[in-house]
Amino acid sequence: MKINTHYTGLSPRYLFHDIDLRVKEYLTHHPDEHLLRMGVGDVTRPLPRVIVDTMQAAAEELAHADTFRGYCPENGYEWLQQTIIDHYYQPRGINFQTDEIFIGEGAGSDLGNLSELFDSDNTVAIPDPTYPAYVDANRMAGREIVLMPCLKENNFVPELPKEKVDIIYLCFPNNPTGAVLTHDQLRLWVNYARKNHSIIIFDAAYEAYISSPDIPHSIYEIEGAKEVSIEVHSFSKSAGFTSVRCGYTVVPYETGLQGMWMRRQCTKYNGTSYISQRAAQATYTPEGRTAVEANVAYYMETAQMIREGLQQVGLQVFGGVNAPYIWCATPHGMGSWEFFDLLLNRCKTICTPGVGFGHNGEGYVRFSAFSRREDVQIALKRIRTEISL
Ligand code: MLT
């Protein structure tokens, strides 16, 4: 056999796996230490009661012959697809057929798997820094990647590529910088893609965290976007489904890719669990919506606490206003990993080193507002004591 040699071009370990290993190593030498976890963007609030009740009821249905279900449709149950259209897209004046909404197990896998629809002979534009899976998935496929710098100087918003690119990844609100795009800024990308016959893969995993009224939640709010955009959503960050697993990907007919994605999913995906899909549907009930909004508001209060706490120390911070991530410049020109180590050793706090998101993340670290409130309070206190600027 011959291995896929493109794997040799990847960094040997995925970012969050690398951090886990370093933390494990630290804990082998300090077994009794309680570490304050502000690294990976994993939720910490318990699931809303209405969601858990719904999952229990769905599980109970499976215990009875007349309500038992076997395989779910590969692209999801129509009742969930229609609920998403009715509650998320129609209020924004956007319409879809249920066949254009593909229910999946979360944004992460679809963002990687979508890459299979495209020939390896495509140029891919990816912001730098970025969610590492976009780069990894395309490197695995051997595609040429054009990195688009997102710097303090451009407010962490990439400029349109000068050359023609075929596939463009955008994530707004952004992970890791917390930056957002206005309608006018997003329109530039849609127009670029229409002119250049490119496709935009729009990662909307954090749209529930938008609080400013002038920021688009969905790329389909922009005229003409259906022809050139695939949009990926997750219930993980909004409804706390990181363990439940459910998300959805919209592949409009106008892209010409809906049939291919259906074909891919039917071959390689056996459907999202019935229980998870019922749980996702429950997030759109009045009770579910209220509970989800309360969780989002809670995390955004935590984000504000982190922003202000770091600013008080004199650190320069970005994001955390329309996004659950705070992007923090390291002090004294320290490298990202150097500051990561300092926070770990002196403050017993885990963050994510910015350089793990790409070359232009060097000199930054990211704090997650999904962290436990009590941990954040202690971490900020320690940072005040330990870090002098
Ligand atoms: C993170 O950046 O912390 C990740 O987004 C976690 C994830 O894979 O969703």
Image (spheres, rainbow, N blue to C red):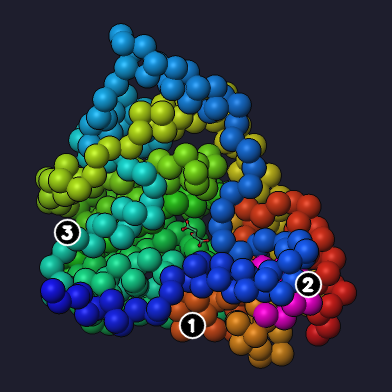
Mark 1 near ligand 1 (CB under 8 Å)? no
> Does 29 sit left or right of 95 as displayed?
right
Instruction: Give the residue type that dot 3 points to.
Output: Leu
Taking the view exactly as shown, the residue that stands out farthest to the right is: 385
Which label's residue is closer to the chain start, 2 or 1?
Answer: 2
Point 28% across, 33% down: residue? 76
Q: Are marks 2 and 1 in contact (CB under 8 Å)?
A: no
Q: Are marks 2 and 3 in contact (CB under 8 Å)?
A: no
Instruction: Give the residue type that dot 1 points to.
Output: Asn
- Where does the image place residue 236, in percent across and percent down from the top left? 49, 45
Image quadrant of residue 23?
A: bottom right
Which label's residue is closer to the chain start, 1 or 3?
Answer: 3
Magenta span has 128?
no
* Residue under numbered circle 1: 360
* Tag of residue 347: 2
Q: Which residues are magenta?
A: 341-350
Tell me which secondary structure the magenta stretch mostly adopts. helix
* Tag of residue 117: 3
**CA distance for labels 1 and 3:** 28 Å
Name the image quarter holding the N terminus. Answer: bottom left
| Residue closer to the observer: 370 or 96 | 370
> Does 240 sit left or right of 182 as displayed?
right
